[in-house]
C-alpha cells in the first residue's frame, strides 16, 4: 500500500483579509526550500458548494517527498473576495502545517525541522499496521486498494474530555462487534492503548477504566481514534484567517480510523476513514451510527447505569435491522388445514395423479377416498380430534394415505422411523402419550393401554362416507422428535397453519403447481418429509415415493428420476453428493428443474460441477436454512455459478412471513456483518415442545418487534447488508451429519449409561477433504471407572440399543482420562485420533480369491487395515462410503452388486461369500 496519503496531514484556513499571493510566496520561500504556492480563482462564493468541492479536492491530494518537496500550498480565491489557504504536508518534511500557515500569513519564520529518521520510523509502523488481519465482520473486499469516508457529529458539552468519551463509546461499539471484552485503539501510527469493556460495570467505573488505559503491546490495532483541537484563528497586520478543516491523515492509518476535531463549540465534527480491503461502506455506515448513539447514551447516562444497558441503536436503526431480517413481508395465508387443501385439489383435479410407489398409483380422488376410509377406521378405533397417532411405516403408498387419514380425523400424526431402536420408539410412544400406532412391525414396543394396527386393517369394510373434523388451522398437524441435549429427544408441535404459510411463501417463487412431480426421499421422522409430502400435495403435484433401497443407491435413484420425469427434488447435501457422483457416470434426467437443499450446511463449491452439466437456467438450485421448530425452512438462496465459485455461505433472505434476528449473548441486536445467535420469528414458529414447558420457555421467547414468539435456534450466523443470512454453524454441541440433526450430549448421555463408564465425550470429526461428507464421522471416547478393563464393543452395543444408527459413534476409544481445559471442560482439540483399524484385522490380504481382493478394496476405501469379520458400518462406514466402495470395486474389475446388499452382507467374509454364490448361480 502507498504510504503517502497516510503520512500526510492537511489544513484549510478561511482567509478573510491578507490573501496577497506575492506576499505569501515571499514568506513561503523563507519558510520552506523549493516549495511553491499554487493560486486558483474559483468562479463562486466562498460558502458555495463549488467552493467546498474545490477545497475538498485540494485537502485530499497528498504531497509526495519522492517527487517533490513533500509540501503543497494552494490559495483558492473566490469571487466574493474571500480565499482559502490549503496546506498539505508530509510528516517526514513538516510536523505541523499550522506552523507553516502562520509563517505565510503572520510571521515569516522557518518551522521546526523534522528528524530524518522520523519518516522511516513511521513507515515501519505503518507496515506493521498493514499486517493486521481484516475482520470478517467488516465485510471488506480482499485486495481492494480504495478507501471510504463517513462523516458524523456528536454533542461536545458532556463535561468530560472529548477524547475520553469518544474512546469509551468506540470501545463499546468494538466490543459488541468483536464479542470481546478487551479493546485496543490506535492513537497514531506508532502508539495504541488497551482497556477492558466490562458489561457489568457502571458507566462511572467504565469511564475510569478507559481513562486509565495502558499502552498496548503486541499485535497492531485494527482501529484508531484521534482527536485534535482546532487551531486558533490567525490575526496580524492586515490579516484575518480562521481554520476550516484539519486532517491529521489523508488516508486511514489504521484499517478504520476515526478522527474528531474539537473546535470549542457544542458539536464535535468527525470523520471515519476506512480501507475497503477491511471494511465495506455499509458496515462503516452502521458502525458510525452505533458510535453516535453510544456516545449520546454514554454522556447522558446516570453514572450508575450498567454498561451493558447502554444502547448502540436508536429506535429507527432497530426497526431497520428488523426489516432487514424480513419483518413486515408476511403474506396473507388462508385459514386452512392441510387436508382441506388436498381435498380441494381432489375436487378440482380429481383424476390427476397424486401419489405413486413402484407400480401403484392413486389419483387425487382415490387418495382422498382411501384417506377417508382409513380416517373412519381410526375413528372407530377411538381416535378423536386432538389425539396423537403414531405412524411407524417405511416409505410407501400407505404411509402417505395414513398421514392424510390422521389429519382428516382431526388428530396429530407422530412419525417414527421403523429403523430406530426399540428403546427410542418406546420413548417416543410414551412421551407423546400415544394410544394408537399404525405400523407393520410385529415387535413395535407398545406402551400400557396403547394398541397397534396395520394399514391393511384400516381399509374398506363398507364404512359410511367420512365427514372430516372441523378444527381451526391452529390445531396441531404433527409432532416430530428431534435430538435433545439431556439425552431425551423432544417433540416439536407444529400446527396446520405453519405448513400452509410455508407453501404460500414458496409456491410462486418456485413455480410449484400441478405439472410438477416430486420425490418423497426422506424418512417421515425427518421434517424434510413435511416439505416433500405436503409441498407436493398442497400444490397439486404428483408425489413419487422413493423405495428405501433406491434412496441408498444413487444409480438406482437417478434411474427413478428419469423414469418418473421428476421435476422437484429435495436433498440433503450429503445425499446430493452421491447423486452428483452418479451424474458423472450417467447424466441425471433433464426433467429436474428445481433442487432444494436442506437438513445440513451446504458447501456450494462442488455444485459448479453439476452446473457444468445442468445450467442454472434449466435447473435451479436453492439452498434453504431451516429448523424443525420453525417449520422446515426459514430462508432461500438460489445458488448460481457465481455463488458456487465463491464458495458462498449465504442461505438467503428470510421467506415471506418469516423474519430473522441476530443477537449477542445478552440478546441485543448486532449490526450486519457481525456474527451472533440466529433467532427466528414469524409464521413458521411452532411455539412449543410437547410436555416440556421449561424447555419451551427457554427456546420460544417473546418477539421484540412483532406479535407472537421467536425461536432461539442455537445456530450462529450473521445478516449481510442486503438482508441475506450467512449460516456459520452451531453454538452448542448440536451438529448435523448427513442431514441428521444430532445433539452430541444425547450420545454422551447414552455412553455414560453403559456399565462401568465414568466419563465420555463425543466429537464430529472430518477426515480428508472438508467438502467430502463421506469422511465425516462421530468418534466416541470413554473412561472406565476405577481402571476397569471395560469392553468398548459392549459400550457401543449398549448405545446402539437406544440410538438410531446415524447417532452411534463410528469409533469408540477407551482413555485413562479425558483431556481438560484450564476451565475444567473437555478439551476436544486434545482428544487423540481414534483407533482406525478393525479389531480383527489379522494378516494383510494376499491371494487372488474374492475375499482377499475384496478386503484389499475395503482397506483402500477406509485407509486402514480391516479384518475379514469386521462390520462395514462398525468401522465407520456409511452410505456415502458404500457408494465409494462400489466405484472402487468396479475400478478393480470385481463383480458389481446393488448397495442394499452391503446392508445385508456387512463383512468382507459375508460379502465375498455372497458374490461367489451369485457367480455360481446360473
Image (cartoon, rainbow, N blue to C red):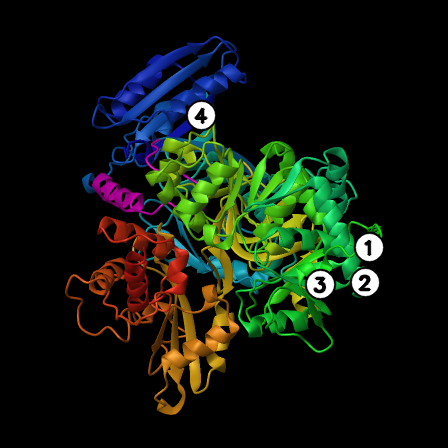
CA–CA distance in space, label 4 to label 2: 94 Å
Q: Is mark 4 on a helix, strand or loop?
A: strand
* Foreground pick, 393 / 32: 393
Report whether 872 appears left or right of 715.
Answer: left
Residue 884: x %, y % from top left: 32, 53
* Foreground pick, 609 / 72: 609
Choose mark 4 or mark 1, whichever is in front: 1
Give the label on residue 463, or none. 1
Choose mark 4 or mark 2, whichever is in front: 2
Q: In this view, does 546 lie above or below 589?
A: below
Q: What element carries label 1?
A: loop
| Sequence-first tag of 4 and 2 | 4
Choose mark 4 or mark 3, whichever is in front: 3
Choose mark 2 or mark 1, whichever is in front: 1
| Highlighted magenta segment, given as a residue range | 118-145
Quadrant housing residue 289: top right
| Sequence-first tag of 4 and 1 | 4
Q: Name the residue under label 4.
A: 13
Quadrant housing residue 723: top right
Determine contact: label 2, label 1, CB under 8 Å: yes
CA–CA distance in space, label 3 to label 2: 14 Å
Q: Name the residue under label 3.
A: 389
Residue 615 in sight from this viewpoint = yes
CA–CA distance in space, label 1 to label 3: 21 Å
CA–CA distance in space, label 4 to label 3: 82 Å
Amino acid at each position: 500500500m502507498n504510504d503517502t496519503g497516510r503520512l500526510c496531514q492537511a489544513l484549510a484556513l478561511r482567509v478573510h483579509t491578507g490573501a496577497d499571493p506575492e506576499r505569501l510566496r515571499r514568506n513561503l520561500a523563507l519558510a520552506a526550500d523549493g516549495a511553491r504556492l499554487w493560486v486558483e480563482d474559483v468562479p463562486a462564493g466562498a460558502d458555495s458548494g463549488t467552493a467546498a468541492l474545490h477545497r475538498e479536492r485540494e485537502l485530499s491530494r497528498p504531497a509526495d517527498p519522492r517527487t517533490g518537496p513533500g509540501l503543497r500550498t494552494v490559495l483558492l480565491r473566490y469571487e466574493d473576495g474571500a480565499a482559502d489557504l490549503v496546506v498539505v504536508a508530509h510528516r517526514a518534511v513538516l510536523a505541523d502545517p499550522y506552523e507553516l500557515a502562520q509563517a505565510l500569513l503572520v510571521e515569516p519564520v522557518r518551522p521546526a525541522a523534522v528528524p530524518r529518521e522520523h519518516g522511516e520510523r513511521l513507515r515501519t509502523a505503518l507496515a506493521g499496521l498493514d499486517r493486521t488481519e481484516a475482520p470478517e465482520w467488516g465485510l471488506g473486499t480482499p485486495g481492494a486498494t480504495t478507501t471510504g469516508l463517513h462523516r458524523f457529529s456528536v454533542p461536545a458539552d458532556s463535561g468530560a474530555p472529548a477524547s475520553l468519551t469518544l474512546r469509551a463509546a468506540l470501545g463499546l461499539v468494538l466490543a459488541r462487534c468483536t464479542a470481546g471484552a478487551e479493546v485496543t485503539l490506535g492513537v497514531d501510527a506508532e502508539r495504541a492503548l488497551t482497556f477492558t469493556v466490562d458489561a457489568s460495570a457502571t458507566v462511572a467505573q467504565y469511564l475510569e477504566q478507559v481513562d486509565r488505559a495502558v499502552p498496548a503491546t503486541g499485535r497492531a490495532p485494527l482501529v484508531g481514534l484521534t482527536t485534535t483541537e482546532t487551531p486558533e484563528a490567525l490575526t496580524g497586520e492586515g490579516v484575518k484567517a480562521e481554520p476550516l478543516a484539519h486532517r491529521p491523515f489523508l488516508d486511514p492509518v489504521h484499517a478504520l480510523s476515526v478522527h474528531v476535531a474539537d473546535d470549542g463549540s457544542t458539536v464535535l465534527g468527525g470523520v471515519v476513514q476506512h480501507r475497503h480491503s477491511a471494511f465495506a461502506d455499509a458496515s462503516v455506515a452502521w458502525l458510525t451510527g452505533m458510535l453516535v448513539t453510544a456516545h449520546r447514551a454514554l454522556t447522558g447516562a446516570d453514572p450508575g447505569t450498567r454498561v451493558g444497558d447502554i444502547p448502540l441503536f436508536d429506535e429507527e436503526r432497530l426497526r431497520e435491522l428488523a426489516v432487514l431480517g424480513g419483518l413486515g413481508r408476511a403474506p396473507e395465508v388462508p385459514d386452512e388445514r392441510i387436508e382441506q387443501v388436498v381435498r380441494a385439489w381432489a375436487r378440482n383435479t380429481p383424476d390427476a395423479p397424486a401419489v405413486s410407489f413402484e407400480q401403484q398409483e392413486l389419483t387425487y380422488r382415490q387418495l382422498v377416498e382411501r384417506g377417508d376410509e382409513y380416517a373412519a377406521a381410526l375413528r372407530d378405533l377411538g381416535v378423536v380430534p386432538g389425539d396423537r397417532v403414531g405412524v411407524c411405516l417405511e416409505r410407501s403408498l400407505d404411509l402417505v394415505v395414513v398421514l392424510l387419514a390422521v389429519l382428516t380425523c382431526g388428530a396429530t400424526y407422530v412419525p417414527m422411523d421403523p429403523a430406530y431402536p426399540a428403546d427410542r420408539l418406546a420413548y417416543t410412544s410414551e412421551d407423546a402419550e400415544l394410544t394408537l400406532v399404525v405400523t407393520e412391525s410385529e415387535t413395535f414396543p407398545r406402551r400400557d393401554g396403547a394398541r397397534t394396527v396395520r394399514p391393511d386393517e384400516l381399509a374398506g369394510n363398507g364404512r359410511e362416507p367420512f365427514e372430516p373434523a372441523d378444527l381451526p388451522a391452529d390445531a396441531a398437524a404433527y409432532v416430530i422428535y428431534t435430538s435433545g441435549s439431556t439425552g431425551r429427544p423432544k417433540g416439536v408441535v407444529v400446527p396446520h397453519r405453519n405448513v400452509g404459510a410455508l407453501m404460500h411463501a414458496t409456491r410462486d417463487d418456485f413455480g410449484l403447481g400441478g405439472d410438477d412431480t416430486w420425490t418423497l426421499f426422506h424418512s417421515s421422522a425427518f421434517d424434510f418429509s413435511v416439505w416433500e409430502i405436503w409441498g407436493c400435495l398442497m400444490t397439486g403435484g404428483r408425489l413419487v415415493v422413493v423405495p428405501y433401497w433406491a434412496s441408498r443407491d444413487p444409480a438406482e435413484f437417478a434411474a427413478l428420476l428419469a423414469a418418473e420425469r421428476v421435476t422437484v427434488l429435495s436433498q440433503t447435501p450429503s445425499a446430493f453428493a452421491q447423486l452428483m457422483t452418479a451424474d458423472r457416470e450417467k447424466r441425471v434426467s433433464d426433467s429436474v428443474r428445481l433442487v432444494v437443499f436442506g437438513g445440513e450446511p451446504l458447501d456450494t463449491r462442488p455444485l459448479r460441477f453439476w452446473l457444468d452439466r445442468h445450467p442454472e437456467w434449466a435447473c435451479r438450485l436453492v439452498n434453504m436454512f431451516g429448523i424443525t421448530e420453525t417449520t422446515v425452512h426459514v430462508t432461500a438462496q438460489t445458488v448460481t455459478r457465481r455463488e458456487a465459485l465463491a464458495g458462498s455461505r449465504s442461505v438467503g433472505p428470510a421467506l415471506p412471513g418469516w423474519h430473522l434476528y441476530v443477537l449477542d449473548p445478552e440478546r441485543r441486536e448486532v449490526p450486519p456483518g457481525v456474527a451472533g445467535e440466529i433467532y427466528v420469528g414469524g409464521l413458521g414458529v411452532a411455539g412449543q415442545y410437547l410436555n416440556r414447558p421449561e424447555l419451551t420457555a427457554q427456546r420460544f421467547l417473546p418477539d421484540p418487534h412483532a406479535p407472537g414468539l421467536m425461536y432461539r435456534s442455537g445456530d450462529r450466523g450473521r445478516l449481510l447488508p442486503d438482508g441475506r443470512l450467512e449460516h456459520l454453524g452451531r453454538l452448542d454441541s448440536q451438529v448435523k451429519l448427513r442431514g441428521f440433526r444430532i445433539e452430541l450430549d444425547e450420545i454422551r448421555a447414552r455412553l455414560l449409561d453403559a456399565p462401568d463408564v465414568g466419563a465420555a465425550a463425543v466429537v464430529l470429526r472430518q477426515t480428508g477433504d472438508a467438502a467430502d461428507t463421506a469422511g465425516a464421522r462421530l468418534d466416541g471416547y470413554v473412561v472406565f471407572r476405577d481402571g476397569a478393563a471395560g469392553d468398548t464393543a459392549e459400550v457401543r452395543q449398549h448405545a446402539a440399543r437406544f440410538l438410531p444408527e446415524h447417532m452411534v459413534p463410528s469409533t469408540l476409544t477407551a482413555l485413562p482420562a479425558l483431556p481438560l481445559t484450564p476451565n475444567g471442560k473437555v478439551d476436544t482439540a486434545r482428544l487423540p485420533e481414534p483407533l482406525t483399524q478393525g479389531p480383527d484385522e489379522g494378516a494383510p490380504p494376499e491371494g487372488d480369491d474374492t475375499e482377499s481382493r475384496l478386503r484389499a478394496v475395503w482397506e483402500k476405501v477406509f485407509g486402514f487395515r480391516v479384518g475379514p469379520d469386521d462390520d462395514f458400518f462398525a468401522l465407520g462406514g456409511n452410505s456415502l462410503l458404500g457408494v465409494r466402495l462400489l466405484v472402487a470395486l468396479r475400478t478393480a474389475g470385481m463383480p458389481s452388486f446393488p448397495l442394499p446388499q452391503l446392508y445385508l452382507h456387512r463383512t468382507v467374509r459375508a460379502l465375498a461369500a455372497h458374490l461367489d454364490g451369485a457367480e455360481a448361480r446360473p
